[in-house]
Image: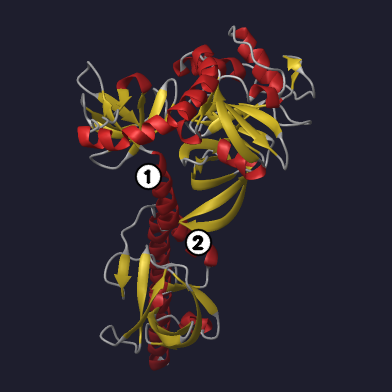
């Protein structure tokens, strides 16, 4: 009987120890889960990782010793790292031959599990990857990709929405984007706003997420390349001019915008686009893109090389032959050029037109009760004491011709759809126009590039 009591006591003790151990493991797993959740929440711009696990990783899977790993065999999964890529090895060994380099988000088929490694098939290769860099949860993989290497495309799903300086409906309006216009979503804020690239010059602003239809993902590298190429096409050399100690360069065109750097007087920069109040520039020293007050930046005027005497003699005969034709052409354009005011006054036309944002389109309308495209232009010009024709076709003969690369705020831009000129808009700067689109719409901002994609760009005239 005594032995039986001792045996029962021993079994109870073993049971108690096992129970305590189980509870302890549960608590430990809970702590690990809490730490894991914290780690997930703080994933942002993480370092690029290339290799087999040397460096920081994001592990959303169960420990490699767990029997649950067996459930992976035969399933499709995705490469998951804190950014960058992972080596596909010929064997379950970091010293074995590298068969391929797989980017985060790459889809693989799991064939087998081998002591902390997965045997996978990716394209034409079959090899091994450490198990902590593979996940079945695509949503989690996508979350990491969007935090490190990818953006998302978006499409405006409402008639016309405001792009603001900050993620706040009370912040200043930068521009408007029209229904159907494509944007690139850089990030989504906690309060329901999206930071975006918009317009042909990749300007930055904020829009309410409820008006954006989210599309597929796009590589950050591809976006950066396209943006740099576009900027290289239009950027012009300039210098900072200020009597102060330095000029602040803002992330967005607003006095409340974040200051990304400062520039001293005569510092070099490049102008991307100009407005009446803010000018978008590239900081030469750091290649950063930002905004400075327009009155603090001046474009560099290229100096023309003097014509050499020898060259002059060679061209005297040719000049004499073409003099008559040149004089004729000059006489045709002289009357137009003489009547055109200075281009710096164009901002006043933009200011006039912006007063009527939201006014309904009315065919033949030329008053605040309703405008068509040329009616809006004529009405705003009349308020500034400038007389232009009533039709868009007639307005194309007013003022002086301006090339697309030299557009300034206030210039009139003209379009056609398979025939003669049928539409006119007012260039507002920063790749935007103000116009009265068509029946059922209202006077609004729209990107010039979007308008050019739906209609043929004919040309531009400067009437102020």
Q: Position of residue 122 (x, y in %)?
A: 47, 81
Residue ID at (44%, 57%):
222
Secondary element at image label 2: helix
Residue ID at (21%, 36%):
310
- Which residue is identified by label 1? 232
Label placed on residue 438: none
Quick check: can you spot residue 271? no
Q: Nearer the viewer, residue 113 or 143?
A: 143
Considering the image in quadrants, where does the N terminus appear?
bottom left
> Residue 366, located in which quarter of the rendered image?
top right
Q: Position of residue 144 (x, y in %)?
A: 44, 59
Camera-near label (1 vs 2) is 1
Taking 366 as reference, is 185 left or right? left
- Which residue is identified by label 2? 142
Taking 300 as reference, is 68 left or right? right
Relative to 354, residue 286 above or below: below
């Amino acid at each position: 009987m005594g032995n039986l009591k001792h045996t029962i006591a021993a079994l109870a003790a073993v049971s108690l120890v096992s129970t305590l151990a189980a509870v302890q493991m549960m608590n430990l797993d809970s702590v690990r889960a809490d730490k894991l959740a914290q780690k997930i929440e703080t994933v942002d711009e993480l370092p690029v990782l290339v290799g087999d696990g040397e460096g920081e990783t994001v592990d959303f899977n169960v420990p490699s010793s767990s029997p649950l790993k067996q459930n992976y065999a035969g399933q499709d999964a995705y490469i998951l790292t804190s950014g960058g890529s992972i080596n596909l090895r010929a064997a379950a060994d970091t010293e074995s031959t590298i068969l391929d380099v797989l980017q985060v988000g790459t889809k693989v088929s799991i064939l087998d599990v081998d002591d902390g490694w997965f045997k996978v098939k990716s394209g034409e290769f079959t090899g091994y990857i450490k198990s902590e860099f593979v996940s079945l949860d695509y949503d989690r993989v996508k979350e990491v990709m969007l935090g490190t290497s990818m953006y998302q495309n978006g499409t405006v799903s409402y008639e016309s929405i405001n792009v603001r300086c900050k993620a706040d409906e009370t912040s200043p309006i930068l521009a408007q984007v029209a229904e159907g216009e494509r944007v690139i979503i850089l990030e989504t804020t906690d309060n329901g706003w999206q930071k975006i690239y918009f317009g042909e010059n990749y300007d930055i602003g904020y829009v309410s997420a409820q008006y954006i239809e989210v599309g597929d993902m796009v590589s950050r590298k591809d976006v950066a390349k396209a943006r740099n190429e576009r900027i290289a096409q239009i950027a012009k050399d300039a210098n900072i001019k200020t009597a102060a100690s330095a000029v602040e360069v803002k992330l967005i065109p607003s006095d409340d915008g974040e200051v990304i750097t400062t520039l001293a007087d005569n510092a070099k920069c490049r102008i991307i686009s100009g407005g009446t109040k803010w000018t978008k520039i590239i900081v030469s020293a750091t290649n950063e893109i930002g905004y400075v007050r327009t009155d603090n930046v001046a474009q560099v005027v290229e100096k023309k090389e003097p014509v050499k005497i020898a060259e002059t003699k060679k061209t005297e005969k040719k000049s004499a032959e073409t003099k008559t034709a040149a004089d004729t052409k000059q006489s045709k354009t002289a009357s137009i050029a003489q009547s055109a005011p200075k281009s710096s006054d164009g901002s006043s036309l933009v200011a006039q037109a912006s007063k009527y944002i939201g006014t309904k389109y009315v065919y033949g309308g030329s008053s605040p009760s309703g405008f068509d495209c040329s009616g809006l232009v004529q009405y705003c010009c009349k308020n500034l004491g400038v007389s232009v024709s009533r039709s868009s076709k007639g307005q194309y003969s007013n003022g002086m011709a301006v090339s697309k690369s030299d557009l300034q705020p206030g210039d009139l831009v003209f379009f056609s759809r398979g025939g003669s000129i049928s539409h006119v808009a007012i260039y507002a700067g920063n790749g935007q126009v103000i116009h009265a689109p068509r029946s059922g719409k209202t006077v609004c901002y729209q990107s010039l590039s979007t308008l050019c994609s739906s209609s043929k760009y004919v040309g531009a005239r400067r009437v102020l």
